[in-house]
């Protein structure tokens, strides 16, 4: 992977979850003029938060292609994503990168077979943990700081309620069906990570072996064409 070793851990923790970027964008997130009052406290936006929660909770499984760009890089890393809620996820990079990240049993396994690297962290430590919950709520553990409708997206900006200093994230949802489109995060050091999704397929059967962290063959096998 093109990310320097010194920043690898922060990139992994930042990139896992789903910014107000259209699917074709690959460079950086550029805010557009809001089509509404961005305050989360308006009656309209409170209703939109509830609708977004309901739409996300209707998604029990998901398969999508992704493109990830980290601040300072001019290249996008691509791959595929599988989700089965609650608690299961596989984030696999296309060759030549060999990294795979698998969430299951409350843990996130990050493995790069070509480099002999393997790391496990609690799923609760990464932003994606929120989106993998059985009953997803955009409140409580997180606080909505703004909601912007622009360019065909609903962009919901969030921060951790008890630790806002850890950074912020913006979840981009399609304006019509409120399906996940993208994710943009700024960590506590001010580094930016953008993940955009395309070719979404939702509520389809997903092979449970994709989330098996005990099966070496399942981890090393990359069932995708890039």
Image (spheres, helix red, strand yellow):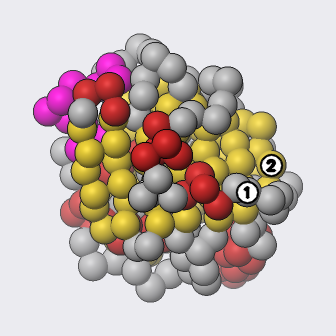
Answer with left or right where residue 91 lies relative to residue 176: left
Q: Earlier in the sequence, mark 1 or mark 2?
A: 2
At 54% from the left edge and 25% from the top edge, which residue is drawn? 94
Decide: is 22 above or below 144.
above
For the C terminus, which image quadrant?
top right
Residue 156 appearing in the image: yes
Which residue in the structure is indicated by mark 1? 206
Q: Position of residue 219 (x, y in %)?
A: 47, 44
Answer with left or right where residue 92 lies relative to residue 48: left
Identify which residue, 35 or 28, lies in the foreground.
Answer: 28
Residue bounds of the magenta highlight: 1-12
- Residue 11 image-quadrant placement: top left
At 42% from the left edge and 58% from the top edge, which residue is drawn? 214
Q: Position of residue 49 (x, y in %)?
A: 66, 74
Which residue in the structure is indicated by mark 2? 201
For the N terminus, which image quadrant?
top left
At 46% from the left edge and 37% from the top edge, which residue is drawn? 220
Identify which residue, 129 or 217, lies in the foreground.
Answer: 217
Q: Position of residue 162 (x, y in %)?
A: 27, 79
Q: Position of residue 80 (x, y in %)?
A: 61, 37
Residue 192 appearing in the image: no
Residue 178 colored in magenta in the image:
no
As helix, strand or loop, the secondary structure at mark 1 comes to: loop
Decide: is 205 above or below 19.
below
Structural distance between the alpha carbons of marks 1 and 2:
11 Å
At 35% from the left edge and 71% from the top edge, which residue is drawn? 124
- Residue 44 image-quadrant placement: bottom right
Residue 11 colored in magenta in the image:
yes
As helix, strand or loop, the secondary structure at mark 2 comes to: strand
């Amino acid at each position: 992977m093109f990310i320097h070793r010194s920043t690898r851990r922060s990139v992994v923790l930042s990139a896992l979850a789903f910014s107000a970027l259209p699917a074709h964008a690959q460079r950086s997130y550029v805010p557009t003029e809001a089509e509404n009052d961005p305050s989360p406290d308006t009656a309209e936006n409170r209703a939109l938060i509830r609708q977004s929660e309901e739409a996300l909770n209707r998604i029990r499984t998901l398969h999508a292609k992704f493109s990830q760009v980290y601040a300072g890089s001019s290249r996008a890393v691509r791959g595929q994503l599988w989700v089965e809620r609650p608690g299961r996820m596989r984030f696999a990079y296309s060759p030549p990168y060999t990294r795979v990240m698998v969430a299951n049993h409350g843990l996130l396994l990050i493995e790069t077979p070509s480099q002999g690297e393997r790391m496990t962290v609690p799923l609760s430590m990464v932003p994606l943990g929120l989106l993998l919950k059985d009953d997803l709520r955009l409140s409580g553990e997180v606080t909505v700081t703004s909601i912007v409708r622009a360019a065909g997206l609903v962009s919901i900006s969030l921060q951790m309620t008890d630790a806002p200093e850890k950074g912020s994230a913006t979840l981009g949802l399609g304006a019509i069906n409120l399906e996940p489109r993208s994710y943009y995060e700024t960590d506590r050091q001010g580094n930016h990570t953008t993940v955009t999704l395309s070719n979404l397929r939702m509520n389809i059967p997903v092979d449970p072996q994709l989330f098996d962290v005990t099966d070496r063959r399942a981890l090393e096998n990359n069932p995708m064409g890039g």
